[in-house]
Image: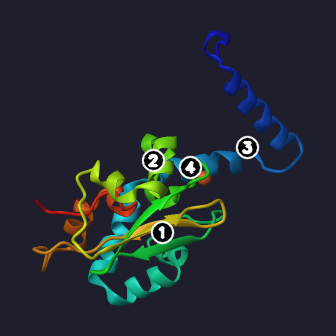
Amino acid sequence: MSDILETPSDRLLAAVRGLLVAKGVMTTDEIAERIRITDGGSPAQGAKMVAKAWTNPEYKALMLRDGTAAAEMLAIPMRGLPPLGVLEDTAEVHNLVVCTLCSCYPRAVLGYPPFWFKSAAYRARAVRDPRGLIGEWGTVLPEGVKLRVVDSTADYRWMVLPRRPEGTEGWSEEQLAAIVREGDMIGVTIPSIA
Ligand code: FE
């Protein structure tokens, strides 16, 4: 790499990688594999899980009990990652996920966190004014629905299982997965077919 393009963080990264290999902590192949797995995470993975849960009660039960096992069942690599928890939205409760401390995010099933998830404004407002916050996305909860804010941490990562929208009866898993967006699985938005 040219020196002109090299930033201090590039040099730090190269030094840490070099040390991991030199000390025998990881091989270059293992580092490459981990990068490949991390880059392979995307909201499409989580959307597949949601669509399956909407159409298959047994899968939904597994997903709510053990999110990691449910992800692995769909061939999403979870090895070496913190456990995945899944929060079910109901007619009474809507869930919103935040990492108040930094940016902990279920990357295997949602990919890299969006910029706003990492922002100080999101992290603070999710706690102080969650209804106002999701209102920024145009999300208004019906009267009487409780809003539960859940903290994602380094030890436990959360995603939301949103409610299946009305008007999707008889849809295939592929059709359903196509309407599930990143924000629906964090709780800032609600799936819709409009
Ligand atoms: Fe974090």
Percent position (x, y) of residue 133?
36, 52
Q: Quadrant of the C terminus?
A: bottom left
Percent position (x, y) of residue 28?
73, 43
Callout 1 environment at 10 Å: few (<14), some (14 to 19), or many (20+)? Answer: few
Say which residue label 2 marks: 122
| 105 or 38: nearer the viewer | 105
Question: Residue drawn 19% across and 66% down?
Answer: 175
| 69 or 158: nearer the viewer | 158
Which mark, residue 116? none
Q: How many marks?
A: 4
Q: Can you tell which of label 1 and label 2 is closer to the viewer?
A: 2
Label 3 vs 4, first from the N-terminus? 3
In this view, the residue farthest toward the bottom is: 58
Say which residue label 3 marks: 28
Label 3 vs 1, first from the N-terminus? 3
Say which residue label 4 marks: 103
In this view, the residue farthest toward the top is: 4
Q: Is residue 85 above or below residue 104?
A: below
Label 1 vs 4, first from the N-terminus? 1
Label 4 vs 2, first from the N-terminus? 4
Callout 2 environment at 10 Å: few (<14), some (14 to 19), or many (20+)? Answer: many
Label 1 vs 2, first from the N-terminus? 1
Residue 113 visible in the displayed image: no
| 147 or 193: nearer the viewer | 147
Say which residue label 1 marks: 75
Q: Check contact, mark 3 vs mark 1: CB within 8 A.
A: no
Question: Residue drawn 78% across and 37% down?
Answer: 16
